Image (cartoon, grey):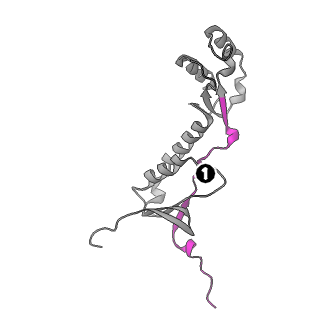
């Protein structure tokens, strides 16, 4: 009787799961300027500065903060700058935009910091299914980042892949 051979395990394929770059939801928080506006429309500088001074900044300790305004109001740039100034000593990071935009930025930053030496001349499958939602931009970034060094890029699971890129054979080989 022939032993059972796991051809996927022996293929040398490396699986890259982009979910590892998605931050946990509890690490992300929104700093919304809406509660600081008069009638949710107008930013009064004196009132805003006073409110920021008494605001509980400890709730942002170690968090990645999306800085935004969730109502349609004209907010001067300095108002965001002032909030960022208060967040800087406590927050892990501050990003201008929504929670989803912050999450996407973190994922893309993680992908752009992948040590490509680990993938040089390797066959890579970028995992395509999972419980964690991955921004589409992450798949594009991973392909762009890895293509110069890998032997091939596939999408899906090692047992069922869609070919994306295959390094051309060197001439004369």
User: Which span is picked out in magenta?
Assistant: 1-30
71 within the magenta span: no
In the rendered view, does 140 fall on the left or right side of 128? Answer: left
Residue under pointer 1: 20
**Above or below, comparing residue 12 to residue 32 in the picture:** below
Q: Residue at x 64, y 12 (%)?
A: 49
**Above or below, comparing residue 102 to residue 115 in the picture:** above
Task: Identify which residue, 18 or 10, lies in the foreground.
Answer: 18
Res 85 → quadrant = top right
- What is the x, y in percent for residue 166? 41, 64
Res 72 → quadrant = top right
Q: Residue at x 61, y 51 (%)?
A: 20
- What is the x, y in percent for residue 47? 66, 10
Position of the C terminus, as image quadrant, is bottom left
In the rendered view, does 10 fall on the left or right side of 59? Answer: left
Dot 1, crowdedness within 10 Å: few (<14), some or many (≥20)?
Answer: few
Dot 1 falls on a residue whose secondary structure is helix
25 within the magenta span: yes
Task: Identify which residue, 114 or 153, lies in the foreground.
Answer: 153
Point out the residue furthest to the left here.
172
Res 33 → quadrant = top right
Counting every numbered tag in the picture gives 1
């Amino acid at each position: 009787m022939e032993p059972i051979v796991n051809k996927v395990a022996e293929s040398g394929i490396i699986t890259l799961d982009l979910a590892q770059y998605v931050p946990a939801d509890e690490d992300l928080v929104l700093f919304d300027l809406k509660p600081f506006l008069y009638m949710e429309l107008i930013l009064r500088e004196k009132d805003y500065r006073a409110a920021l001074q008494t605001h509980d900044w400890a709730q942002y300790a170690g968090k990645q903060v999306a800085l935004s305004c969730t109502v349609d109001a004209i907010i001067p740039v300095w108002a965001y700058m002032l909030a960022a100034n208060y967040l800087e000593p406590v927050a892990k990071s501050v990003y201008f935009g929504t929670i989803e935009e912050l999450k996407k930025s973190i994922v893309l930053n993680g992908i752009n910091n992948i040590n490509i030496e680990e993938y040089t001349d390797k066959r890579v499958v970028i995992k395509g299914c999972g419980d964690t939602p991955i921004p589409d931009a992450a798949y594009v970034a991973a392909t762009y980042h890895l293509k110069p060094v890998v032997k091939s890029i596939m999408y899906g699971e090692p047992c069922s892949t869609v070919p994306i890129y295959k390094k051309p054979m060197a001439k004369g080989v």
